[in-house]
Image: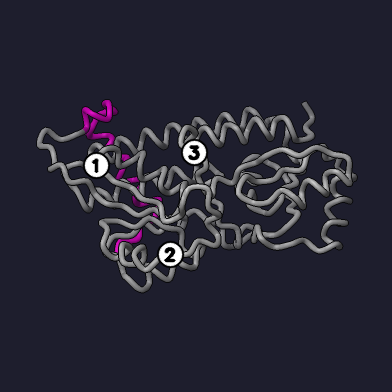
Amino acid sequence: MLTLRPRAARAWVTAVCALCAMALVTACVPAAQPDGNRLEVLAAFYPLQYVVEQVGGDRVDVTSLTPPGAEPHDVALSPAQVRRVGEVDLVAYLPGFQAATDEAVAARQPEHVVAAGTGSRDDTSELASDPHFWLDPTLLAEVGDDVAHALTELEPASAGAFAARAHDLETRLHALDEEFAVGLAHCAGATLVTSHEAFGYLARRYGLVQVGISGIDPAAEPSPARLREVGAVVEQNGVETLFFEVLVSPKVTTVLAGDLGVRTAVLDPIEGHTDDAVDYLGTMRANLESLRGGLTCTG
């Protein structure tokens, strides 16, 4: 089983890109083209699907184990999907995030695996139980390096193309990170009240303080005591907006906002994909605009 670590993979990608002399992606494709059979990849949920598609390009056929618009925390796999886990060329998943996927990987033992987030997630802080590392674009960029390495193991003839695409993705994700840093520069220390605690990595990256109405589990109902605690935080910190998600009922958030006399806005944790016209970058930029319009900042 191939389980990759970000630092080693990133060094490998950098070396290959240096040999390509920072040429265009197409210039890195070897003269001898591989055959027309695409590599078949299963991605556990949308952010991983996005990375594999960006790095693999036309050499991969990617299927997500989480249907469009579905809440990935509770995804259930059919027997056919479980079988496919052991049949495809590569499986990209996040250990510990989806029990059904973990069980399928353990049962089918796929030969090539990208275990995303194993080198990125913080298991020593308040983020230890938060799987949403991809909301920090710099951490998602590391997965691109892992994917490029794994795909090269499967198709060495395309090593240059995979490395160049991973480098291009990393460049775009770091540019997105800079957009957030600039856009939220006056919001350091601002209180971010969300329907559930999915935004810890985003909050840490950009200096926000996350307060979840519910915990990590989006289906958990907050207790009356918790609602009172959140209400006190809102009043004490001058919070003007409560943020809810697209795949979870906004009822609790909207009722609480009405009781407190504040607004609501959408903040997408990008767990599932709901609009084919908008990719990860577009959704993150929409999140940035939502934050800029909803947070109580100093400037």
User: Could you tell me how far apart the alpha carbons at marks 2 and 1 are, in whole angstroms?
Assistant: 26 Å
Residue type pointed to by label 3 = Tyr
Q: Nearer the viewer, mark 2 or mark 1?
A: 2
Relative to the observer, which residue lies in front, 1 or 294?
A: 294
Where is residue 236? Give x, y as percent. 89, 45
Q: Relative to 148, is 206 on the left or the right?
A: right
Which label's residue is closer to the chain start, 3 or 1?
Answer: 1
| Residue located farthest toward the bottom when viewing the structure as drawn | 107
Which label's residue is closer to the chain start, 2 or 1?
Answer: 1
The magenta segment? 1-28
Q: Main secondary structure of the magenta part?
A: helix
Q: Relative to 9, is 152 on the left or the right?
A: left
Magenta highlight on residue 20? yes
The answer to whether residue 204 is above or below residue 44 is above
The quadrant of the picture occupied by the N terminus is bottom left
Point out which mark residue 59 bears: 1
User: Could you tell me how far apart the alpha carbons at marks 2 and 3 are, in whole angstroms?
Assistant: 24 Å
| Residue located farthest toward the left when viewing the structure as drawn | 32
The quadrant of the picture occupied by the C terminus is top right
Where is residue 286? Give x, y as percent. 60, 32
Q: Relative to 57, is 75 on the left or the right?
A: right
Residue at (65% x, 46% y) in the render: 245
Point out which mark residue 280 bears: 3
Residue type pointed to by label 2 = Leu
The answer to whether mark 3 and mark 1 are in CB contact below 8 A is no
The answer to whether residue 213 is above or below residue 278 is below
Q: Dot 3: few (<14), some (14–19), or many (≥20) neighbours within 10 Å?
A: some
Q: Secondary structure at mark 3?
A: helix
Q: Secondary structure at mark 2?
A: loop
Point out which mark residue 77 bears: 2
Q: Secondary structure at mark 1?
A: helix
